[in-house]
Amino acid sequence: MLTDIHTDDLTAVVRYALETTRATTVCPFHRDVVVRIGDDAAESHAFERVKRMARSDGTKWEKESLRMEIGRQLGAAADGRCPKCDPTAPGR
């Protein structure tokens, strides 16, 4: 819920938007693994959602900062499935 996140923390706000639009999900067995679903519409929706969120002082986030953080988080996420659960993952 939005009241549970710190709206002054860009990382947390973007994570919230990505998870609530189902652009990403956390592996239910490995809480440290974020998985990118690969749904372009959900990712666009996450950007639209987060750019409307206000910080505690009422100001909005800069769009370029949001784009960079969304790109960073999506780039860091595993593509499609958890590599710790996937039996075909390299090194298993």
Image: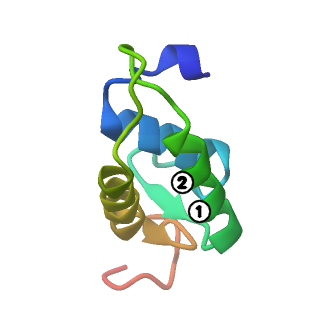
In this rendered view, identify the residue nearer to me: 11 or 35. 11
Amino acid residing under circle 1? Glu
Q: Point out the residue furthest to the front here.
A: 59
Q: Quadrant of the C terminus?
A: bottom left
Q: Is residue 27 visible?
A: no
Q: Residue at x 51, y 16 (%)?
A: 4
Give the secondary structure at mark 1.
helix
Instruction: Tell how many labels.
Output: 2
In this rendered view, identify the residue nearer to me: 18 or 55. 55
**Vertical position of residue 92 compared to residue 31: above or below:** below
- Decide: few, some or many residues near mark 1? Use Cα within 10 Å; few <14, some 14-19, many ≥20: many
**Vertical position of residue 50 compared to residue 84: above or below:** above
- Rendered location of residue 13, percent (x, y): 44, 35
Q: Are marks 1 and 2 in contact (CB under 8 Å)?
A: yes
**Vertical position of residue 23 compared to residue 26: above or below:** below
Q: Is residue 58 visible?
A: yes
In this rendered view, identify the residue nearer to me: 61 or 70. 61
> For residue 78, which quarter of the picture?
bottom left
- Rendered location of residue 47, percent (x, y): 54, 54
Q: Residue at x 39, y 52 (%)?
A: 63
For label 2, the residue is 47
For label 1, the residue is 43
Q: Residue at x 41, y 33 (%)?
A: 60
> For residue 67, which quarter of the picture?
bottom left
Q: Residue at x 55, y 50 (%)?
A: 18
Q: Which mark is residue 59?
A: none
- Decide: few, some or many residues near mark 2? Use Cα within 10 Å; few <14, some 14-19, many ≥20: some
